[in-house]
Image (cartoon, grey):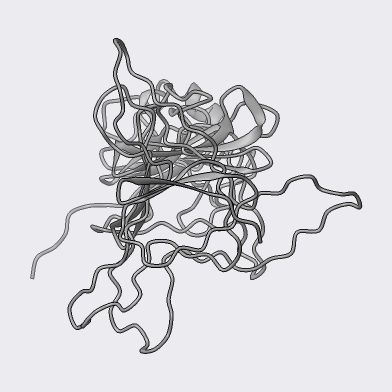
């Protein structure tokens, strides 16, 4: 059985007594407590009490906010366990410390980087309130030319929701426009009291698609090439109900109501004259049609089309110019207020008919 050869010795002193103890040398291992600060020191047998290093800082009554003194460190920094030693975290801003679960911020958060998840493909959810009844989310302050840029994948695919450049009262959406390159004319969508859809450039077409299939393309003004101004690609439909008429274009009946007073002329569909010009020289156009219709073609499963017309009317037809018929005519019934010239199979006829 062994015997321990040691003794436990402690002393208590006030801060003033410790400061004056220049000729007191605590024994090796002797603990001296500062009753004012709650700190302690451990004697080494050779160093005066006033010169020993004190540790800790918890008084018998514990820490008291606003009164317990500490040494070292920097004001406003946050203490933390740094591998068993008290360390400090720098802080920014003022007010309360923020914990990691449901923190509440009452002022601005400057230059944040917010992740919704650390996982691949993680999501982030933004809500205006924790209440079940949600409100409106505002981005930016009112009264200025606010620009809010949302990057989708890369900066080349960015979406910008902001006021129209130069017009703060109008909302605009810019697609794929580099930040700082927005103008009053390269937006994609704009609300000015009406919805404006814009191709963002004078040479860019607008293409309306359905399931990635182009249905209607509006081409821009071009200086070269031979694209149409409008191009419509009707879907190739199958399984259409038997014995039921369908239409490529159908303008439903309507009633247009005017203020009282006689109308001299009304035109439901009015296609004005189109000018044909050339860049230089004297160039002739052999044949020009303002409107051209081809008759139907019998497709698979169709044994024939009995009456195949490229144009039909269910009312009178009035022609202000000559009528040229290039098909073999068996019966022609024309009604006109004046003499008209009719060319049938290359032979010119003049007719005058009254209803």
Looking at the image, the residue that sits furthest to the bottom is: 242
Looking at the image, the residue that sits furthest to the right is: 260
Residue at 50 percent across and 56 percent down: it is 126
Could you say which quadrant of the image residue 234 lies in? bottom left
Residue at 47 percent across and 33 percent down: it is 91
Left or right: residue 122 versus residue 258 is left
The answer to whether residue 257 is above or below residue 141 is below
Left or right: residue 219 versus residue 59 is left
> Could you say which is closer to the camera, residue 40 or residue 145?
145
Place of residue 246 in the rendered image (x, y in percent of width and height, measured from the top left) = 43, 76
Left or right: residue 295 versus residue 332 is left
Looking at the image, the residue that sits furthest to the top is: 281
Residue 157 shows in this picture: yes
Place of residue 148 in the rendered image (x, y in percent of width and height, measured from the top left) = 51, 36
The answer to whether residue 52 is above or below residue 63 is above
> Could you say which is closer to the camera, residue 35 or residue 73?
73
Residue at 59 percent across and 32 percent down: it is 163
Residue 32 shows in this picture: no
> Could you say which is closer to the camera, residue 119 or residue 283?
283
The answer to whether residue 355 is above or below residue 265 is below
Place of residue 351 in the rendered image (x, y in percent of width and height, measured from the top left) = 52, 50
Place of residue 222 in the rendered image (x, y in percent of width and height, measured from the top left) = 33, 26
């Amino acid at each position: 059985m062994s015997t321990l050869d040691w003794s436990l010795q402690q002393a208590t002193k006030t801060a003033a007594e410790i400061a004056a103890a220049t000729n007191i040398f605590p024994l090796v291992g002797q603990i001296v407590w500062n009753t004012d600060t709650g700190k302690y020191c451990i004697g080494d047998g050779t160093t005066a009490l006033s010169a020993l290093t004190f540790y800790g800082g918890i008084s018998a009554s514990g820490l008291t906010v606003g009164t317990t003194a500490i040494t070292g460190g920097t004001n406003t920094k946050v203490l933390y366990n740094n591998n068993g030693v008290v360390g400090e975290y720098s802080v920014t801003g003022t007010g309360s410390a923020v914990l990691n679960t449901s923190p509440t911020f009452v002022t601005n958060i400057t230059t944040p980087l917010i992740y919704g998840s650390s996982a691949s493909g993680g999501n982030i959810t933004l809500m205006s309130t924790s209440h079940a009844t949600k409100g409106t989310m505002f981005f930016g302050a009112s009264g200025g030319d606010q620009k809010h840029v949302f990057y989708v994948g890369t900066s080349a695919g960015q979406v910008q929701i902001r006021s129209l450049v130069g017009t703060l009262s109008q909302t605009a959406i810019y697609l794929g426009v580099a930040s700082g390159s927005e103008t009053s004319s390269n937006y994609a969508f704009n609300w000015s009291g009406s919805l404006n859809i814009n191709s963002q450039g004078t040479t860019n077409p607008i293409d309306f698609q359905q399931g990635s299939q182009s249905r209607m393309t509006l081409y821009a003004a071009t200086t070269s090439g031979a694209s149409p101004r409008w191009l419509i690609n009707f879907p190739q439909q199958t399984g259409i109900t038997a014995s039921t008429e369908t239409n490529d274009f159908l303008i439903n009946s309507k009633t247009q109501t005017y203020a009282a007073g006689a109308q001299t002329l009304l035109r439901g569909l009015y296609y004005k004259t189109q000018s044909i010009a050339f860049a230089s020289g004297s160039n002739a156009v052999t044949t020009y049609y303002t409107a051209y219709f081809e008759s139907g073609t019998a497709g698979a499963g169709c044994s024939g089309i009995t009456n195949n017309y490229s144009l039909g009317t269910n009312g009178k037809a009035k022609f202000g110019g000559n009528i040229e018929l290039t098909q073999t005519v068996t019966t022609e019934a024309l009604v006109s207020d004046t003499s008209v010239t009719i060319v049938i199979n290359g032979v010119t006829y003049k007719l005058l008919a009254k209803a």
